[in-house]
Image (spheres, rainbow, N blue to C red):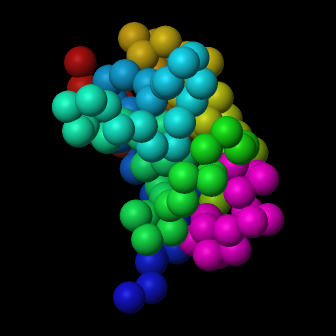
């Protein structure tokens, strides 16, 4: 079954909801990971990692920026080709550079920059 292509709004909603629910970055040795399996088996995902379906994920993706992935993984590019490229970079930076306590604020600012609707997960206190 083909994956449904994401728009900037649907990608933003998915990332915002994921980051708020996860509440911590997917970091290993101070490096962002698209997927990080913890000792107890829990899997953490970064902002972009939560957009990558299991059938498209490959460990070789780790350590590469999202734009680089598009050249190597055309099915991922096809899935995300309706999402503004710079939005993906900005959301990757929210995760990689941000402090989880500041994610809501950073995500709201990002939504405003791209004229996106703010999902309920960012409105809740």
Tell whether position 120 is magenta.
Answer: no
- Residue 59, given in percent of the width and then of the height, sits at 54, 52
Residue 123 at x, y percent in the picture: 31, 28
Residue at the image position 76 percent from the left and 52 percent from the top: 67
Q: Position of residue 81 (x, y in %)?
A: 67, 68
Query: What residue is drawn where x is 52% and y is 73%?
Result: 5
Residue 71 counted in the magenta span: yes
Mostly what secondary structure, the magenta segment?
helix
Q: Quadrant of residue 42?
A: top left
Which quadrant does the N terminus fall into?
bottom left
Toward the front, the furthest residue is 39
Stretch in magenta = 66-81
Q: Nearer the viewer, residue 10 or 96?
A: 96
Q: In which quadrant of the rendered view does residue 73 lie? A: bottom right
The quadrant in which the C terminus is found is: top left
Find residue 56 and report its horizontal and vertical position in percent.
51, 68
Taking the image as shown, residue 109 lies to the left or right of residue 65, namely left
């Amino acid at each position: 079954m083909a994956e449904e292509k994401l728009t900037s709004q649907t990608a933003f909603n998915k990332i915002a909801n994921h980051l708020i629910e996860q509440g911590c970055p997917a970091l290993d040795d101070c490096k962002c990971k698209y997927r990080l399996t913890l000792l107890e088996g829990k899997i953490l995902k970064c902002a972009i990692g939560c957009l990558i379906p299991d059938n498209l994920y490959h460990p070789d993706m780790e350590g590469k920026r999202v734009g680089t992935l598009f050249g190597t993984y055309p099915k991922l590019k096809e899935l995300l080709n309706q999402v503004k490229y710079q939005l993906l970079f900005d959301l990757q930076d929210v995760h990689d550079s941000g402090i989880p306590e500041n994610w809501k604020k950073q995500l709201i600012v990002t939504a405003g920059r791209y004229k996106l609707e703010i999902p309920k997960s960012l409105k809740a206190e």
